[in-house]
Amino acid sequence: MNASPVLSTKALVAGYERDLPIVKGVDFALAPGGFTTILGPNGAGKSTFVKAMAGLVPVHSGSIALGDRDITKVPAHELIRAGLAFVPQNDNIFASLGIDENLRLCAGILPAGRRAERIEAVYALFPDLAHRRSMIAGALSGGQRQMLATARALLVEPQVIILDEPSAGLSPKLVGEVFATLTRINAAGVAILLVEQNVRAALAVAHTALVLADGHIVHEGPAAPLADDPRLGEMFLGRHAAQGEPA
Ligand SMILES: Nc1ncnc2c1ncn2[C@@H]1O[C@H](COP(=O)(O)OP(=O)(O)OP(=O)(O)O)[C@@H](O)[C@H]1O
């Protein structure tokens, strides 16, 4: 028996301008504790799709649910309290503040009595950050910045965390560290939705994969087998492949 999804969409159409849909009717479901990666060619609408779920891009039609709650029209700041955390690709930390200040600032939305306890719980997940509490965030490496951004999102004990290309611009070693961290977070019971360009690394950690092309789902299934699936290249090349153009 399948548990009801923690995050889902029905016939979701979304985009920045009303007459220009980018996400074109997507039905999606993320299982509680699941780990799904969203892949697809540049401009497929991956970021737009997750931003719509995070309340950051207008929904034209269809619906979004967090558990049983319809969140289609819930603003982004309320979604964080409701248990849906979003880590954007850029500008996801306060670079001029210390690591500890970054966390304390974000913990401000929690009841006062829980803040210190949650900050320590998050430090326990990120020992690299715990060792550098007073360091200015802007001086962190790319991978450490991503970890701080993820740590901030975890302060509220979300049911779901959505990450938009956390490995962008990182060296292979740092990519490995970021993805190992995501695996630990998921093992602790937090469902993860991960937008990635780094296809191989994402398929190695996620349970399921969803491939978007031109705002539509063109494939959905277990992640690991997709890495060796000959159709993978075609899904990324889209109509160019169908027209027989070279990769
Ligand atoms: N802020 C914006 N305003 C208007 N259009 C946008 C905006 N951001 C993205 N778009 C458009 O939406 C389409 C999908 O972009 P999106 O960033 O969602 O794709 P993506 O699959 O995440 O691509 P990439 O892998 O290159 O990041 C593109 O045509 C893009 O130009």
Image: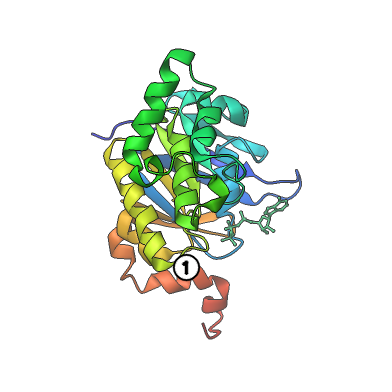
Q: Residue at x 75, y 43 (%)?
A: 18
Give the answer, above or below, for where 179 lies relative to 117.
Answer: below
Residue type beneath disc 1 = Met
- Name the image quarter holding residue 11: top right
User: Which residue matches tag 1?
Assistant: 235
Q: Residue at x 31, y 60 (%)?
A: 204
Picture coordinates of residue 151 (x, y %)? 44, 39
Direction from residue 97 to residue 192 in the image, left or right: left
Q: Residue at x 71, y 46 (%)?
A: 16
Picture coordinates of residue 143 (x, y %)? 45, 55
Res. 34 in view = no
Crowdedness near tag 1: few (<14), some (14–19) or many (≥20) residues, C-alpha within 10 Å: many
| Local secondary structure at mark 1 | helix
The N terminus, quarter of image: top left
Indicate the colouring scheme.
rainbow
Direction from residue 150 to residue 239 in the image, left or right: right
- Viewer-side residue, 22 vs 113: 113
Res. 48 in view = yes
Q: Residue at x 52, y 73 (%)?
A: 237
- Viewer-side residue, 81 vs 121: 121
Picture coordinates of residue 195 (x, y %)? 48, 53
For the view shown, which residue lies furthest in the bottom direction? Answer: 246
